[in-house]
Amino acid sequence: AQRWPKSRPRTDPLTLFDFARLPVECLARGEVADAFFWPALFVQWLLVVVPMMALVAFPAAFPMILGTVSWWPFALPWQTAATKALLGGVVADMMSNLHSFIIIACNHSGSDLYRYFTSCKAYSAEWFLRCAYSSANFETGSDFVDIAYGWLNYQIEHHMFPDMTPLQYRKLQPLVKSVCKKHGVQYIQQNGLYRTWRMLRCAVGDDQMIQCNAILPPASAKDKGLVPAND
């Protein structure tokens, strides 16, 4: 990553075609070192991805291979196997969608979170406050919890510092929480199922989010006599 070519932003997505295209473009521009960077990165990517793909594919491929030579003792007629595979896929998809909904949909909804009528400048004091007043964290602090939530349990820290890695969010979270507590800033950290319930109450109209102009009202809001959200 330290030798990343300056001609391409690190945040731009890469495809397999890019690994073939980018070295050619670098050579055309006379950037020989950058041309060798992309094949090296591709090899590193393969070393990470191939074992993961094998870990996923092997459990399914192993019985299929044994079944072709009649060595798999649990072989089923293809009609039965196809039906079970279809039902298993449908149930797995439903459970996956439910899990995704719980960890994604309710991080920024609830009667204790804020919505704004005005915009603000990124990385300003108002911006950092909005990250805290408009986001909710889930449980944090361990591999088991973080993996279960897909590392989406650090929403406050993620919006404050969007370019950090998930592991850095775990290290940063106690500090951000302590700073918010010290200065009386709202910091919500609750269970994902409870946050889902609060989000659903807003969805059906039993509750509504807090609406305001700003946490720290801009000068124009003061001139109009608008009341700040925390007053």
Image: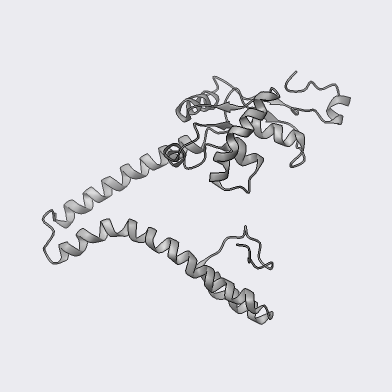
Q: Quadrant of residue 19?
A: bottom right
Question: Toward which corner of the image does residue 112 lie, by quadrant?
Answer: top right
Residue 133 visible in the snapshot: no
- Residue at (53%, 32%) from the top-left corner? 106
State the residue at coordinates (53%, 68%). Answer: 41
State the quadrant of the C terminus.
top right
Residue 43 visible to an observer of this rendering: yes
The location of residue 131, given as percent across then percent down, is: 66, 35
| x and y, in percent, of residue 109 in the image | 57, 30
In the depicted structure, whether residue 131 falls above or below residue 231: below
Q: Quadrant of residue 218?
A: top right
177 and 222: which is toward the camera? 177
For residue 177, side relative to residue 98 (left or right): right
Q: Position of residue 63 (x, y in %)?
A: 20, 59
- Position in image of residue 151 (x %, y %): 50, 42
Image quarter where the N terminus lies is bottom right
